[in-house]
């Protein structure tokens, strides 16, 4: 499936995208501020290198998702489930992770500058060499 078909199906109301593969998909040319992934099932998805900048992923299920080197800058991942997700070297700058579950997630080398992680569950998350410049960890859960 290509990026355009993915967004078309998403806009058509489809929410089940388990195991979807959109490696290096460039969604930057699409208006992701209008694309709402709220509650979508993207578990086991391969979105490595994908550009999802400013997407609304509120409440999305990204369990076991491969988001290595993905651009999630400015995204809303409010209450999203990122359990066991691989976010190695991802750009998560100015992203809202409020209430998100990142249990056992791999965040090694990720850029999380100015990220809001208030209420996020980072239990057992791997965070080696993470850029946390001005990240808000107030009241985070561990």
Image: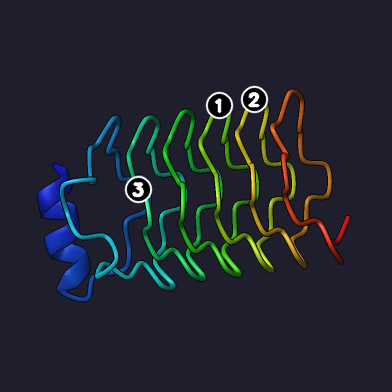
Disc 1 target residue: 89
Quadrant occupied by the N terminus: top left
Answer whether labels 2 and 1 touch (C-beta < 8 Å).
Answer: yes
Give residue 40's position: percent from left, percent from top. Answer: 39, 67
Q: Who is closer to the viewer here, 68 or 130?
A: 130
Identify the mark nearer the N-term, 2 or 3.
3
Q: Residues within 10 Å of mark 2 (few under 14, many from 20)?
A: some
Q: Residues within 10 Å of mark 3 (few under 14, many from 20)?
A: many
Q: Who is closer to the viewer here, 64 or 29?
A: 29
Determine whether the residue tagged by mark 3 lies in a helix, strand or loop: loop
Answer whether labels 2 and 3 touch (C-beta < 8 Å).
Answer: no
Q: Is residue 107 visible?
A: yes
Residue at x 37% of width, y 30% of height? 49
Give residue 116's position: percent from left, percent from top. Answer: 67, 59
Identify the mark nearer the N-term, 2 or 1.
1
Answer whether labels 3 and 1 touch (C-beta < 8 Å).
Answer: no
Measure the alpha-carbon separation of dots 2 and 1: 4 Å
Determine whether the residue tagged by mark 2 lies in a helix, strand or loop: loop
The circle on residue 109 is: 2
Quadrant occupied by the C terminus: bottom right
- Judge whether 36 appears above or below 2 on screen: below
| Residue lying furthest front | 134
Q: How many marks?
A: 3
Measure the alpha-carbon separation of dots 2 and 3: 18 Å
The circle on residue 52 is: 3
């Amino acid at each position: 499936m290509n990026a355009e078909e993915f967004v078309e199906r998403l806009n058509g109301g489809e929410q089940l995208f388990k195991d979807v593969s959109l490696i290096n998909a460039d969604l930057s040319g699409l208006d992701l501020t209008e694309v709402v992934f709220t509650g979508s099932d993207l578990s086991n998805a391969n979105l490595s290198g994908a550009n999802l900048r400013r997407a609304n992923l509120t409440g999305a299920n990204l369990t076991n998702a491969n988001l290595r080197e993905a651009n999630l800058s400015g995204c809303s991942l409010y209450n999203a489930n990122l359990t066991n997700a691989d976010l190695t070297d991802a750009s998560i700058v100015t992203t809202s992770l409020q209430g998100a579950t990142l249990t056992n997630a791999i965040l090694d080398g990720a850029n999380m500058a100015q990220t809001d992680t208030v209420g996020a569950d980072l239990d057992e998350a791997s965070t080696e060499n993470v850029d946390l410049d001005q990240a808000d960890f107030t009241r985070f859960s561990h």
